[in-house]
Amino acid sequence: MSQVIFITGTSTGFGKLTAQTLAKAGYTVIAGMRGVDSKNAAVAAEMAKIPNITVVEIDITDDQSVKAAFDEVVEKFGRVDVLVNNAAVSGFGLLEAYTIDQIRRMFEVNVYGVVRTYQAVLPVMRRQKSGLIINVTSGASGHTLPFMVPYLASKFVVESITEGAQDELADYGIENVSIQPGVYPTEMNTGVKVGVNADRTDIIEAYGAAAQEKANALGAALFGKMAQFEMNPQTIADGVLALVNMKAGTRPLRFPLDAIAQGTDREFIKARADIKAKWVAAYYE
């Protein structure tokens, strides 16, 4: 049997493309999504017709749904070789203008959803003494930008999970990688899917036109770069395929895929790793 690859958030965007790309490459793909019998019934039926794809219901904000999805896959296939944590929500707006409940909604998906899938898949991966977990984060997950603070904070957390789990799971042959995309024209960024945005209108009004103009300028700059560099979401799907195909033990901790950054993301990653090595040496050697 080919490797069994579980991908979350496959109804649209990176997740859908990645499922199709890996299935075409001959892998056994589990396409996880919410609402396979309701709001995503059409795309679920479309994906189920593709050879090598099995569609599974999963709501990563629900403990029982996550457990049931992985139990179903392990019962049917006996193993999970790769987990791709792709499902996420975006969000924009002033930090002060977010209610705590709205930030919780974002973290429920982007952070706790990742923790849930880790806790569901790790028992089988530990038994196998092998596994690969790929977390889709953000090109800006090593720093932050205004008007995107809660969203990027959630991606910071996933970077922390990836880095810490890499050391915790090394004895079990389980690798962790974060893919760091830049800005791509997926439903998350084009407005097709509504994000978890700032919801305190009184605060938004109090900041006035100047803040809105800054936010608009940032958005225009990001979308302008996206068009200039012809950002293609297939790049992320191909990146996941490349990671899966790499020999175990050779995969990088962080895998940036952002043409707009023009190499500065790789410089940042290297500099951070070099400084961390010095810090670790100072504390532990």
Image: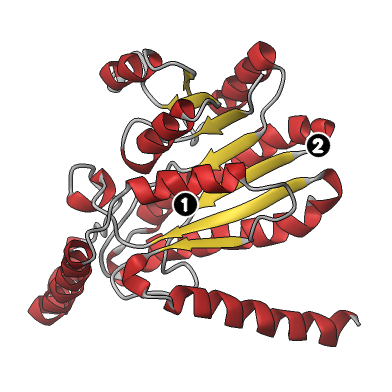
Number of marks in the rendered image: 2
> Left of 140 or right of it: where is 233?
left
Amino acid at dot 1: Phe
Disc 1 crowd rating (10 Å Cα; few below 14, some 14-19, many 20+) is many
Which residue is depicted at the point 20% across and 74% down? 218
User: Residue 60: x and y, percent?
Assistant: 50, 35
Q: CA distance from mark 2 to mark 1?
A: 27 Å
Q: Which residue is labeled 2 in the image? A: 126
Element under disc 2: helix
The correct choice, above or below, for 151 with respect to 1 in the image is below
Tell me the quarter of the image containing the N terminus. Answer: top right
Q: Which residue is labeled 1 in the image? A: 107
- Most extreme residue toward the left is 209
Which residue is depicted at the point 40% across and 30% down? 20
User: Please, which colouring scheme is shown?
Assistant: secondary structure
The correct choice, above or below, for 145 with respect to 166 in the image is below
The answer to whether one can see residue 63 in this image is: no
User: Residue 108: x and y, percent?
Assistant: 47, 45
> Left of 124 or right of it: where is 23?
left
Q: Along the line of sight, which residue is nearer the eye, 12 or 200?
A: 12
Amino acid at dot 2: Arg
Which residue is depicted at the point 72% across and 56% down? 166
Q: Quadrant of residue 122?
A: top right
Q: Along the line of sight, which residue is nearer the eye, 152 or 272?
A: 272
